[in-house]
Amino acid sequence: MTVDGQVRSVAAANASAVDLVTAEIRRAVLTGALAPGANFSIRDLAAQLGVSHIPIREALRRLESQGLIILRQARSASVAPLTSADLQAIYRLRYVVELPLAGASAGRRTPAQIARLDELLEGSRHPDPDIAWQAHYDFHAALVHPAANDWDERVLETLWMAAERYTHLVFDPTQITEAERARRYETHRVLREAALVEDPDGMAQALRQHLRANEERILSHIAALEHR
């Protein structure tokens, strides 16, 4: 498979080549420009992005660790397929790691951290989909931050990134009505309220219900794709 038109050149950008390549390939995977299961040549990808094969390989290794890319022994790679089993594994680990941390963080926020949580909640309904999506990601990170250490955050970052491509299928930030925007805001407002009360079990239960509802919606979508 060639990648012409599916990824954009990063040759002229002023930043780390590996970071830029990682971000661009990740964008292509999340948006479906590089479709699940698609095979591509590392050489073709390097030509399309306007860089050497060295940052390409390093970027692909990063994305492989996030479950987005499968590297082959030859000079090729493929986009990881979307499967129900994969999604369930991601969420199973999120329940184990994320819920206790959110519970332990409940009621343990400084005024500045509460203000940041509110800022992110408002940002999650911003009309710019990129701003809204980043605010949503950062909001979930803020829910666990008071109790999380560096290892917790590394593990959760991997899980959130792995879950993101599935979430995009159902909660596409570029295709959203005002009613859906309001619904998403309200589900996260409930989490914000729980986060301010020193009730670990209540916070963990609120987040579990939120994640379970998302998981079930995504699983329903994936099941339809698997049976095509």
Image (tube, rainbow, N blue to C red):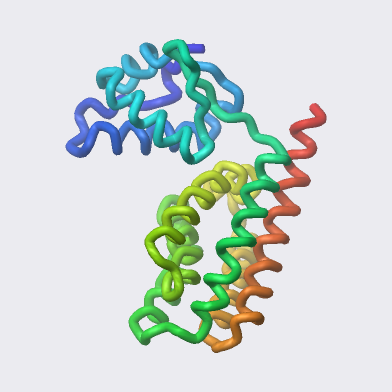
Q: Which residue is drawn at 37% across and 85% down?
A: 110
The C terminus appears in which quarter of the rendering?
top right
Q: Which of 32 and 138 is in front in this view?
A: 138
User: Considering only vertical position in the picture, is 84 above or below 209?
Assistant: above
Q: Nearer the viewer, residue 129 or 227?
A: 227
Q: Residue furthest right?
A: 227
**Quarter of the figure with residue 168:** top right
**Quarter of the figure with residue 81:** top right
Percent coordinates x, y for residue 125 in the rendering:
50, 64
Percent coordinates x, y for residue 9 in the rendering:
30, 25
Q: Residue at x 75, y 53 (%)?
A: 216
User: Considering only vertical position in the picture, is 20 above or below 53?
Assistant: below
Q: Which residue is drawn at 22% across and 37% down?
A: 16
Q: Residue at x 36, y 12 (%)?
A: 43
User: Considering only vertical position in the picture, is 177 above or below 74?
Assistant: below
Percent coordinates x, y for residue 48 in the rendering:
34, 18
Percent coordinates x, y for residue 189 in the rendering:
57, 75
Q: How many discs mark residues in the rendered view?
A: 0
